[in-house]
Amino acid sequence: MRPRLFGVDFTSRPSRRKAIVVAEGRLEGNVLTVSSCQRLEHFPAFEAFLQTPGPWLGGFDFPFGFSRALVEAQGWPNTWPALMASLSVLPADTARAQLTERFRAWCGARPAGQKFAHRATDGPAGSSPSMKWVNPPVAWMLLEGATRLWQAGVTVPGMHVADPARIALEAYPGYLARRITRASYKSDEKAKQTPVRTAVRATLLAALAQGVDDYPRVKWEDGLEDAALADASGDTLDAALCLVQAAWAEVRRTDGFGLPPFDPLEGWTVSVPPAA
């Protein structure tokens, strides 16, 4: 039985205006067909989604771990399941306040240009350090997303063995998008949702249809491509980009989903090669 494939564009404060977007698709040969997109407007809906019976494989757009250097300096548990368990104890707002204080202290003690603790995957992926609490607040995405993966009992390859039929991989749409163009294609600010960015989304969609490097070619059902073009926030397109990364991993399932050796505390972004 082929697994269902998902791509998840995440937000740390889901709402009707800014929802978690889940794209689903099926892979046939080298063609990935995006078959549906759903919007999850609150965390209970996301938690219910994680309990979807397997087999499924999902690419999730949030960091799965903190830098080992940060974790060890804070005296936190140094295995991923234990760390997720400890982060799940406090209410989210209390945890955010305490973590912000620790992150500020960490950054304040370091020179300019070396403020943040980076994971090994951040450089080759071009992603923000997972301890950033603003612009973008990926630390809160980790806090709200990765802990729920642990609570849901999904397997995270290389980090946590649980239900083998439900598998989560860290994805990053920006990595795949930059394989096509470095131009900005999205904004949550109305004033920045310009025709220029719409044109860039069209460029991205055209490239995905042709096939980017060793990723599968993308087709869309039921007007979903038009929806991705029209969604100026980029959330629909980002969910699809995560889905493409999940499909790339599915092809390499028997080779560890294509993941290189990595630190099981920090995690790794799927389809990103190690730094040379």
Image (cartoon, rainbow, N blue to C red):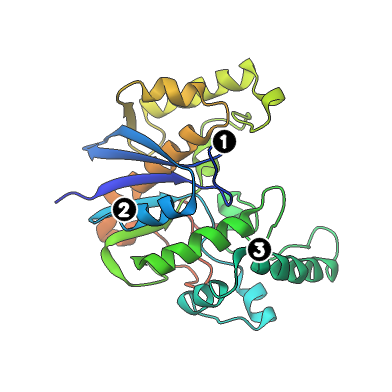
Residue beneath label 3, please?
93
The reply to whether residue 107 is in sight is: yes
Residue at horizontal 33 percent and vertical 31 percent from the top? 217
**Residue 264, image x and y in percent?**
47, 72
**In the rendered structure, which amino acid carries the disc numbered 2?**
Leu
**Residue 179, image x and y in percent?**
51, 36
The mark closer to the camera, 2 or 1, is 1
**In the rendered structure, which amino acid carries the disc numbered 1?**
Arg
**Residue 88, image x and y in percent?**
53, 71
Residue beneath label 2, please?
57
Residue at horizontal 79 percent and vertical 66 percent from the top? 104
**Does residue 83 sit above or below 52 in this rendering?**
below
Residue at horizontal 66 percent and vertical 52 percent from the top? 137
Mark 2: secondary structure = strand
Depth check, front residue: 42 or 67: 42
Dot placed on the residue nearer the N-terminal end, 1 or 3: 1
Q: Are marks 2 and 1 in contact (CB under 8 Å)?
A: no
Count of number-bearing discs:
3
Q: Quadrant of the C terminus?
A: bottom right
Separation of residues labelled 2 and 1 (CA atoms): 27 Å
Q: Is residue 153 left or right of residue 114?
A: left
Q: Are marks 3 and 2 in contact (CB under 8 Å)?
A: no
**Does residue 140 sit above or below 236 in this rendering?**
below
Residue beneath label 1, please?
17
The mark closer to the camera, 3 or 2, is 3
Dot placed on the residue nearer the N-terminal end, 3 or 2: 2
Dot placed on the residue nearer the N-terminal end, 2 or 1: 1
Binning the other alpha carbons within 10 Å of mark 1 as few (below 14), some (14 to 19) or many (20 upward) gives few
Depth check, front residue: 109 or 235: 235
Binning the other alpha carbons within 10 Å of mark 3 as few (below 14), some (14 to 19) or many (20 upward) gives few
**In the rendered structure, which amino acid carries the disc numbered 3?**
Asp
